[in-house]
């Protein structure tokens, strides 16, 4: 069997803030067209990992490649080329308050190339439909939407430019269980429809199990376990076992007490 194509590769990546090491010789491969979910507690480096891939943060050392393009310590041209392939659903949706929902959704398209207002609106309406929002939502503003509707609109914006890579930052945070599950279903649907490579960070195990092909866990700046989603409940790793079952007793306890 041939080796899977690697879309994103991180090798020996170290990122610190002052004396605090967040990513410690961090290694991770994200396969093309897979949905990989990275789990871990608050402050373990999940968001820092994403920001290093996007070029928002620069690691002290190590290599990060996207489609073979080195982005760690790269220039703006390399980052722009890579980020043009990316769509992202932010934790708080991050919609622009002064834009209508249609304008928000079309933003990732219009920001990259000249597109007529008519075509931009058609794209926005099509993507809103994909996430289950009616045409009537298009001319509303973010302040007029519920939290769940904002998440849907943010997802529509993430897929508007048909990206090769999708990043999901805590996609169910702040949502009730029912709406969270609707967002999970929409993520699965959108990833299947677009064929994109998906990388999600979350501490929500229900979400992780639902949307992931594989799951990886970060602890103390390293990946301590990675495997198929179906394997996580039988993982012979006390850190994973404690985290996924939400137990207070276990090896993670000392880190919490500090």
Image (cartoon, rainbow, N blue to C red):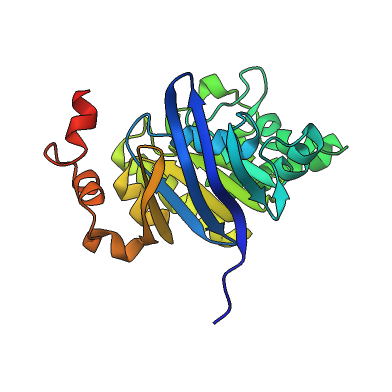
Is residue 240 toward the left or the right of residue 247 in the image? Answer: right
Report the quarter where the C terminus lies. Answer: top left
Q: Nearer the viewer, residue 145 or 164?
A: 164
Residue reaching furthest left?
Answer: 249
Percent across and percent down for residue 60 are 58, 31
Vertical position of residue 57 compared to residue 215: above or below: above
**Which residue appears at 46% of the width and 36% of the height?**
23
Percent across and percent down for residue 108 are 72, 37
Q: Nearer the viewer, residue 97 or 164?
A: 164
Quarter holding residue 252: top left
Vertical position of residue 99 compared to residue 26: above or below: above
Vertical position of residue 178 compared to residue 22: above or below: below
Report the quarter where the N terminus lies. Answer: bottom right
Percent across and percent down for residue 158 are 62, 41
**Which residue appears at 42% of the width and 47% of the height?**
38
Is residue 245 toward the left or the right of residue 125 in the image? Answer: left
Q: Nearer the viewer, residue 24 or 146?
A: 24
Residue reaching furthest bottom?
Answer: 1
Percent across and percent down for residue 165 are 62, 50
């Amino acid at each position: 069997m041939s080796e899977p194509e690697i879309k994103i590769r991180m090798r020996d990546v170290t990122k610190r803030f002052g004396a605090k090491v967040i990513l410690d010789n961090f290694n991770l491969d994200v396969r093309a067209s897979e949905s990989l979910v990275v789990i871990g507690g608050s402050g373990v480096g999940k968001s820092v990992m994403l920001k290093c891939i996007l070029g928002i943060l620069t690691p002290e050392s190590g290599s990060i490649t996207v489609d073979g393009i080195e982005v760690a310590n790269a220039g703006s041209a390399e980052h722009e080329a890579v980020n043009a392939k990316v769509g992202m659903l932010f934790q708080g949706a991050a919609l622009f308050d002064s834009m209508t929902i249609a304008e928000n959704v079309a933003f990732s398209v219009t920001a990259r190339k000249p597109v007529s207002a008519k075509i931009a609106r058609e794209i926005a309406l099509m993507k809103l439909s994909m996430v289950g929002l009616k045409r009537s939502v298009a001319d509303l503003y973010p302040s007029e939407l519920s939290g769940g509707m904002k998440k849907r609109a943010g997802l529509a914006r993430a897929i508007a430019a048909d990206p090769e890579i999708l990043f999901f930052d805590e996609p169910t945070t702040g949502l009730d269980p029912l709406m969270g599950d609707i967002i999970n279903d929409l993520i699965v649907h959108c990833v299947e429809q677009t064929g994109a490579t998906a990388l999600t960070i979350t501490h929500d195990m229900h979400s992780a199990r639902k949307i992931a092909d594989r799951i990886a866990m970060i602890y103390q700046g390293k990946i301590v376990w990675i495997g198929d989603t179906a394997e996580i409940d039988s993982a012979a790793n006390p850190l994973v076992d404690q985290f996924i079952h939400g137990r207070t007793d276990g090896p993670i306890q000392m880190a919490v007490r500090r």
